[in-house]
Amino acid sequence: MSKIKSLILGSAATLVAVAGAQAADLPVKAKAVQYVKICSLYGAGFYYIPGTDTCIKLGGYIQADVNIASNNYNNPLSGGSFAGVFTGGGTYAGVNGNHNHDSDSFTTRSRAQLNLDTRTATEYGVVRTYWSSNFEHSTGFGPSSGNLTVDFAFVQFAGFTFGKAISNFTTPWSAYTANVNTSAYIGGQDNATGITQAAYTFQFGNGVSAQLGVEDNKTIQRAPILNAAFTPFGVVTGSTGAPSSSSLIASGAYGTGGQLSPDIVGNIRIDQAAFTAQLSGALHNVNANYYTADERDGRPSDKWGFAVSGGLLLKNLPTGPGDKFSVDLTYTEGAPKYVIGGTVGNGYNIYGSSDVGYESFAAGSLFDGVYGTGTNIELTKVWGVRASFLHNWTPNWETGVFGGYTHVDYNGNATALMNTPAILAALGAGSSYNPDFNIWQIGTRTAWTPVKNLTFSGEVLYTKIDQTSVGTITLPAGGFNPTAAYEFKDQGVFTGNLRVRRTF
């Protein structure tokens, strides 16, 4: 009996061993591989790049615009072919620009914006890179099909920023507290595009910080320097391709020298739950070219322009959750780009009707400074103030109201230099030319966000050029306009924008 029992137990053990060996040979279900791993260190939307400790976030938007009586930036102050001069009879492809049938009543734009944000934790802190570009197709004035811009491209490491980033001079809310659609809301610097720079950010705690850096002197739409004597500032025909005919321009009369020094820019900021305040300052080298086409005739000495700005943003207002109010004031001498810049040009014309001349027009030219043969550079003074208020009616509806005033002042010496013989000969009896001018703006925007990250918005903007010249001036024929006397007269224009944007 014991032998039989032993045989049975031995057989069972053998079967278990064989079964175990066979089970070991069977395929085992592998653990799921997480090909994309969420990175929670820097907020929502970041993922680890496979095989690295670097987190990346992909974002952007798709946008469609219709711009009414304006260009593709809802910008009634766009410059023409020659920056910083009286260009072409119209400043945009709008019904009030050329004041004739050679105008677009509207333009359209489709834009795709893409940005990449990468961050890596190191013993020196986070290393960050950021890139943002726009691809767009447009009709009318503005970028055409195939246009590509690089608005931002920078590296941040241990408090330093290198590359194209928002200027240290710009307030953190910039022009966009009211979530405006226009990129022509002036009176201070905006963040429509970055400026190449090297800067350092100091963190003092309790919401107090400061920045100091050097920035590219020749940024987008920087105002040039006018040599009023060499190829004199005067009355000539309109530039080729300009939207209209006769013009007051300084063809070839620029006196801007090469870039010798970057701008030195800094700010100090206080950021609290109820408000953000910032003071900014900048030094800008104004470097003129030669007096004549012969460098042996010499040139004026360089001058340093400057800009200062102060601003305040109020948050958590009693008018409603998410409501905001901002105001900022900027004053410059020899550095007007800190008040009028971005996508706004340096020369503006708006034409209208007249009971005195063939038509009326208001014109403005923006220069860092003006000089003539044997003179020093006369720096231009420009200051501006702007304010905006944003109200949220519901979580899905908001309305912003915004406005600003900008004053451009040429001193007596600069005004005398700009009254060249060509201009004086073209003035009518009792007329006078004064290059000083003001710009008034007021606008409103309402937006509806039916679902997250999809917004429909509409904007109306009124812009007025308040010029100081008196009487008439004879402009030569060009385009569709005849040789005739044109009346100096303040001009105002309404422009609009309709937009659909899907952000991702």
Image (spheres, helix red, strand yellow):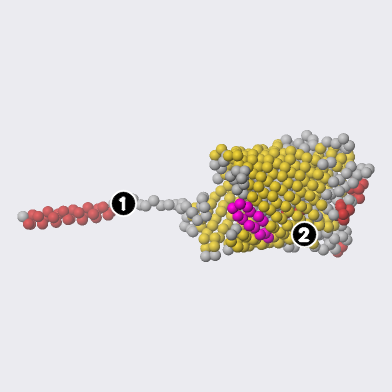
- Residues in magenta? 266-278
**3D distance between C-alphas at marks 1 and 2:** 77 Å
Question: Which residue corresponds to mark 2?
Answer: 305
Along the line of sight, the residue nearer the viewer: 386 or 374: 386
Let me know if residue 221 appears in the view.
no
Q: Please tell me which of labels 1 and 2 falls first in the chain.
A: 1
Tell me the residue at 86%/52% (across/down): 415
The residue closer to the viewer here, 318 or 481, is 318
As drawn, 62 above or below 252 = above
- In depth, the one of 187 and 159 nearer the eye is 187
**Label 1 crowd bin: few (<14), some (14–19), many (20+), radius 10 Å:** few
Report whether 475 appears left or right of 501. Answer: right
Q: Residue furthest left?
A: 1
Q: Label 1 belongs to which residue? A: 27
Identify the residue at horizontal 56%, vertical 38% (top origin).
Answer: 450
**Which amino acid, mark 1?**
Pro
User: Where, by quadrant of the figure, is residue 278 drawn?
Assistant: bottom right
Residue 244: x, y in percent? Answer: 80, 40
Given the image, on which type of amino acid does mark 2 rest? Gly
From the top left corner, tell me how far across and down residue 423 is, in percent.
89, 48
Task: Inspect this view and state whether residue 185 appears.
Answer: yes
Which residue shows up at 5% across the image and 55% down it?
1
Query: Is 133 displayed left or right of 39 in the figure?
Result: right
Left/right placement of residue 211 relative to residue 224 reads left
Q: Quadrant of residue 492?
A: top right
Kindly report which numbered mark, 1 or 2, lies closer to the viewer in this rendering.
2
Label total for image: 2
The local secondary structure at tag 2 comes to strand
As drawn, the label of residue 429 is none
Q: Residues within 10 Å of mark 2 (few under 14, many from 20)?
A: many
